[in-house]
Image: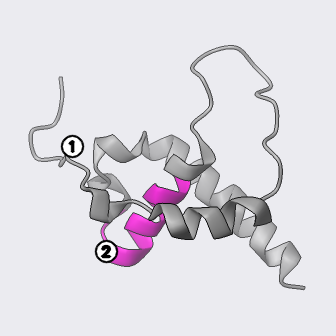
Amino acid sequence: MANKDVNTDVNESDKIPDVLWAEIEPLRPPEKAKPKAGCPRMSTRKAMDARFYILGTGCQWKALPHGLGALSTVHDRFQISTGVLLVVGR
């Protein structure tokens, strides 16, 4: 049963603009193959849209709109990217 209090709408203003994505995409590391069967891997762009939404709005993780992806997936991808940024920043 879906939680009626959780926002599922995603506006275009909540997403990374195409112009900015064109600058970000060449800088990101290559996609890793998914190690196990199951649902397809969330696209990097969708994961980044969700991370920017969380950082830009300051909302709680549980308040992430469903249209931006599953909370656990977005959080996992956020932790992975944070680790990559820490290594690159050294």
In the image, taking residue 32 as reference, residue 90 lies left or right, namely right
Snapshot quadrant of residue 86: bottom right
Q: Is residue 41 above or below residue 51?
A: above
Quadrant in the picture for the C terminus: bottom right
Q: Is residue 39 above or below residue 55?
A: above
Q: Amino acid at mark 1?
A: Thr
Contact between marks 1 and 2 (CB within 8 A): the answer is no
Q: Which residue is mark 2?
A: 57
The region drawn magenta spans: 47-60
The reply to whether the magenta stretch includes residue 30 is no
Q: Which residue is mark 1?
A: 8
In the image, taking residue 45 as reference, residue 16 lies left or right, namely left
Q: Position of residue 71 (x, y in %)?
A: 43, 45
In the image, taking residue 69 as reference, residue 24 lies left or right, namely right
Q: Amino acid at mark 2?
A: Thr
The residue lying at 54 percent from left, 42 percent from top is 73
Q: Dot 2: what SS?
A: helix
Quadrant in the picture for the N terminus: top left
Crowding near pointer 2: few (<14 within 10 Å), some, many (20+)? few
| Mark before the other along the chain sequence, 1 or 2 | 1
